[in-house]
Image (cartoon, rainbow, N blue to C red):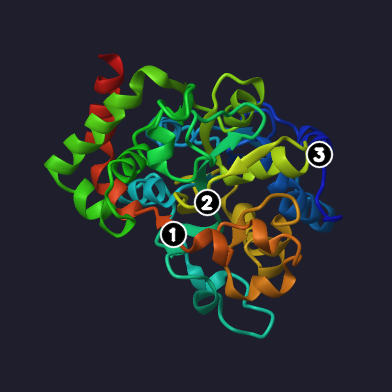
Amino acid sequence: MSKLKTTAVLTSAAIGLGLMSATAFAGKITFVSWGGSYTASQVKACIEPYEAKTGQQFNIVDYNGGLAEIRTQVEAGNVQWDIVDMVPADGLRGCDEGVLEVLDHSQWLPAPDGTPATEDFVEGALDECYVGNISWSTVPAYNRKTITATKGINRMPTTMKDFWDTKNFPGRRGLRKVPRVNLEWALMADGVPHTKIYEVLGTKEGQDRAFAKLDELKDDIIWWEAGAQPPQLLADGEVVMVTAYNGRLFNAMYVENKPFEIMWGPQVFDIDGYTIVKGAPNKDAALEFLKFCTSAEALADTTNYISYGPLRKSSAQFVNPAILPHLPTAPDNFKTALTFDFNFWADHSDELYERFNAWLAK
């Protein structure tokens, strides 16, 4: 896998473009993303080539998702961010609230064979206020050197039932400190088939069932909030199993040579998209950049730096074959995947986050 780049190279590249406050540079496009190896992949695949081609400069800012900071900027009439990478549920909500710009999807570059972009993006990758970027997944994983099983269990964990099974696989677990995906996994651990997860979670009884299952694990959980934390928790032995973004685990496993194992069976498949904040100070320049960054070639190039899949059909021809088995959409990885229902979470996010935070405080 010779085209994989080291974290050190990526991090220094990102620092070279300036990880500082959003007000530091006038005229620079402020590009907001999730940090770490993911932002670094965007720097290498999109930002650096575009900067070299056009001279456009960028200010890169990390965030942990959500709409709070965007709302504050728009409501104050002091918009500092231009482009924000976000999950579709936030994109839908931000669009409904009027804090994101409506995008004309006919402007994106066609596929190399001339197919219009609107036909080339995969289903769900385009919506009123966002244009798709990558596919990724949240997955459970364990450290082969630290996990142990009780006598009589002659295998390693493979399911969310195993993740919840602290008797046969003793030790603490790491979960992201949010309800999304955790509630889905709680239902999986309680025996709900993947095909019924959102049907069950859409009912009061199903939500009660998910929180009751979380109760069983609560005392054994170490909560994480930033994407860099799960691999570190696993490496340090603070947890024996953890949930994490697959790209973060890929970087730890194949760049840093950590002895981790991904449990692909329970993966929750998701996508990210680019949005432009309503009233962005560099809106026109941001749109020109996104035309470049959402091209088939640029999206494919991202896979050379992180194992997140491109959302254009024509990108496949440009992906390094060595990377394909590590993408969430690889056939062996995807056969039991649960596709994250961002419409469900756009509708139920407020109530479930409120309940989750109250549950945490108990």
Q: Are marks 2 and 1 in contact (CB under 8 Å)?
A: yes
* Element carrying mark 3: helix
**In front: 93, or 195?**
195
Camera-near label (3 vs 2) is: 2
Q: Residue furthest right?
A: 2
Camera-near label (3 vs 1) is: 1
- The type of residue carrying mark 1 is Thr
Label 2 environment density (alpha carbons within 10 Å; few <14, some 14–19, many ≥20): many
What percent of the width, then of the height, locates residue 19? 70, 30
- The type of residue carrying mark 3 is Ala
Residue 336 is marked as: 1
What percent of the width, then of the height, locates residue 58? 71, 42
* Element carrying mark 1: loop
- Residue under numbered circle 2: 264
- Residue under numbered circle 3: 13
Vertical order, 333 against 36 (above or below): below
Q: Residue furthest top?
A: 362
- The type of residue carrying mark 2 is Trp
Task: Specify the quadrant of the image occupied by residue 231.
Answer: top right
